[in-house]
Image: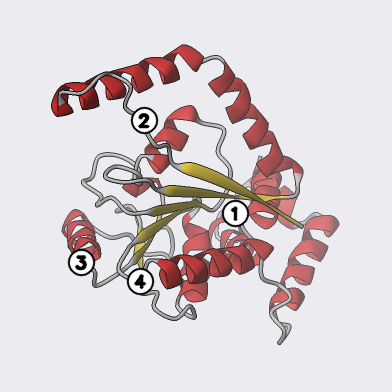
Amino acid sequence: MKARHALELSETQGLDPLLAYHEWRLVPNGGPATKLVLDNIHYKNAISAAKELLGLADGGGSHPKLDVLESVATTFIAEHPASRFIVFTKYRASIASIVGRLQVVPGVVPARFVGQETKSPVDQGINRDEQQETLSRFKAGEFNALVATQAAEEGLDVPDCDLVVCYEATGSVIQSIQRQGRTGRKRAGEVVVLIANGPIDQANVMTLDRKLARLPEVYQHVRRFMSGRSAAANNTPAHTVIRDSRTRENSLP
């Protein structure tokens, strides 16, 4: 399980999150299962290679998703300079590299949003008051990009925005709905899902597709409800067109 988690981090998130997991979760653990991983020659070689790649001056160790994210953010802010967007990631270890990349995009002012638990000395949690302050500043426009974990997916009044970027694919219908629900509330929004060309992200895409295929009636009932509600509000026939958020999938090398 520990080796699988390390593999998922390297494949879907990048080398920075992998090394953060290695240095702050595995090395201090000291348990027999962890020692088995740390003493494995293949794991040692992988960590050594990751450190070497991250040390390259040309940024060769960065995940291709960061390049696509920078491109998406650049285009979005150029077209919607007064708008906001949210980047959701499954792992807190990815947030530092995502925030760092967004900071180089002209016009983008990102903010980190995580849960209250402190994971490591370099991954401090933020308490409830700090969370509310961050959301208030995001709503006021002091930040126009929120880089968040699942802490922003439910239970908090997160302002709506015009773009949601999912840093990885998810196989959870609920999580997918919660993430996409942060955009398209008042006008048509956009959802971008970053999918690495590897088995883990691809498997999550297929899992979500299979689950959604079993729920066509739920989708149609919601559309009928929204159409009828809009018609009643406007006193017009019930043929109102509901614009959906569009999802663009970027396949990455």
- Which of the colour schemes (rainbow, by chain, secondary structure, one colour) is used? secondary structure
| Nearer to us: label 2 or label 1 | 2
The residue indicated by pointer 1 is 30
Residue shown at the point (71%, 72%) measured from the top left: 61
* 88 relative position to 54: left or right: left
Q: Residue furthest front?
A: 237
Considering depth in this image, is 82 or 129 the residue closer to the camera?
82
Q: Is residue 148 visible?
A: yes
Q: What is the CA distance from the residue labelled 2 to the residue labelled 3?
A: 34 Å
| Nearer to us: label 1 or label 4 | 4
Residue shown at the point (43%, 30%) measured from the top left: 174
Instruction: Tell me the tag on residue 81.
Output: 4
Residue density around tag 1, few if under 14, some if 14–19, many if 20 or more, within 10 Å: few
Q: Check disc 1 and give the amino acid type.
A: Gly
Residue 125 percent location from the top left of the image: 33, 59
Q: What is the CA distance from the residue labelled 2 to the residue labelled 1?
A: 58 Å
Q: Check disc 2 and give the amino acid type.
A: Val
Element type where label 4 sits in the image: loop
The residue indicated by pointer 3 is 137
The residue indicated by pointer 2 is 241
